[in-house]
Amino acid sequence: MSSTPDPSGFSKDNPFPARITENRLLTKPGSGKETRHIVVSIAGSGIGYEPGDSLGVYPSNRPSEVDELLARLGATGAEPVLLPRAAAALPLREALAGRLALAAPTRKMIETLAAKAADPSEKARLDALLAPEAKEALTAFLDEREFVDLLAEFPSARLTPQEFVDHLRRLMPRLYSIASSPRVYPQEVHLTVAIVRYRTNNRDRVGVASSYLADRAPLGVAQVPVFVSNSHFGVPEDGARDAIMVGPGTGVAPFRAFIQDRAASGAKGRNWLFFGDQHRATDFLYEDEWPKFIAAGHLARLDTAFSRDQANKVYVQDRMRESAAELWAWISAGAHFYVCGDAKRMAKDVDKALHDIVSSQGALSPEQAVEYVKQMKKDRRYQRDVY
């Protein structure tokens, strides 16, 4: 995805200070997940967007984590530090709060701590991790830790603020698929955000951007830096074409935008949505909206797969196979096929199901099915937004 300069003048390098106007839980009590609907106001910005685009969000780190780092460095936060490509030095607290990533330490940090450790037992531990035969042990050790853990575990290794920040990477913006149509919400961008919370090394961890949106971005205050990232993922240019959309979990976000947009534009093509998650009772995202689209004739079919609601797990690709004949009827008549969500497993399984359906229903050899799907991609009839 690329961020092209918007006519508004706002971009990745010049983000717009947006306001969060709504932050509500989509998952219900008892869910193993926390997924939120976040509404970002872009009123007054002149920013435009299209269905399929993403919103880039520049987050900030948790103040409690910044405070602990400063304490363990013995710093006030006012110390000037210079960051790569920065024109001038800035205060350490500002750098740690919003410019630098505080997770994912590397071997280089362990080497620096080993060189600085004044306590013999700390130095011995660090040297052992750096031994050639300890590669796997070092990887496992670092996987469980963030920078604050290392300062806490090896306090005799005193680093200056500059030495410390030299080990940190830039805090990058996070991209979220937009879940609204500009035809319906020209002054707003809707996001469907899975909030990341977990525990390692006896510490509570969070996803920086998701927890920023969930917990720390105040409602109604213009201070959330955002930009639109343009995508090659989008609704069929020909509104008469049918659209098949496979979006389990937060992968449903762009398809909420697609359906809103096709309804608002008067597109005659039919829409078919496959949605999946763990439990219908707690994880059915936008459950109240889909029946309205169906009743209005804007959603022809909704197939759901709730994997944990029965003894045998059922996924979206299983629902595709169950409707293989109908799917092929849509595809062979020119329907566009879209997938959004998890790249590691879901997208591969859906791709395999698509190939199998094209082969079996189209009476094609596996090799011919591969060529057919390749042609769908060339014709932009098969698009994926996977991560």
Image (cartoon, rainbow, N blue to C red):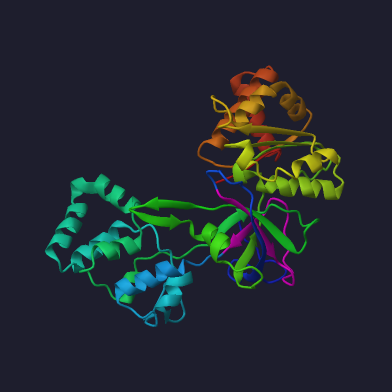
- Coordinates of residue 308 in the picture (x, y in percent): 55, 32
- Coordinates of residue 205 in the picture (x, y in percent): 42, 56
Query: Can you see residue 233?
Result: no
- Coordinates of residue 352 in the picture (x, y in percent): 58, 28
| Residue in the picture at 68% in, 48% down | 254
Query: Can you see residue 228?
Result: yes
| Residue in the picture at 69% in, 50% down | 52
Image quadrant occupied by the N terminus: bottom right
Residue 97 relative to residue 183: left or right:
left
Up the image or down, 107 lies above or below 345; here it is: below
| Residue in the picture at 52% in, 59% down | 211
Up the image or down, 218 lies above or below 26; here it is: below
156 or 214: nearer the viewer: 214
- 32 drawn magenta: no
Up the image or down, 297 lies above or below 134; here it is: above
Q: In the image, which residues are magenta?
A: 34-57
| Residue in the picture at 71% in, 67% down | 42
- Coordinates of residue 8 in the picture (x, y in percent): 71, 70
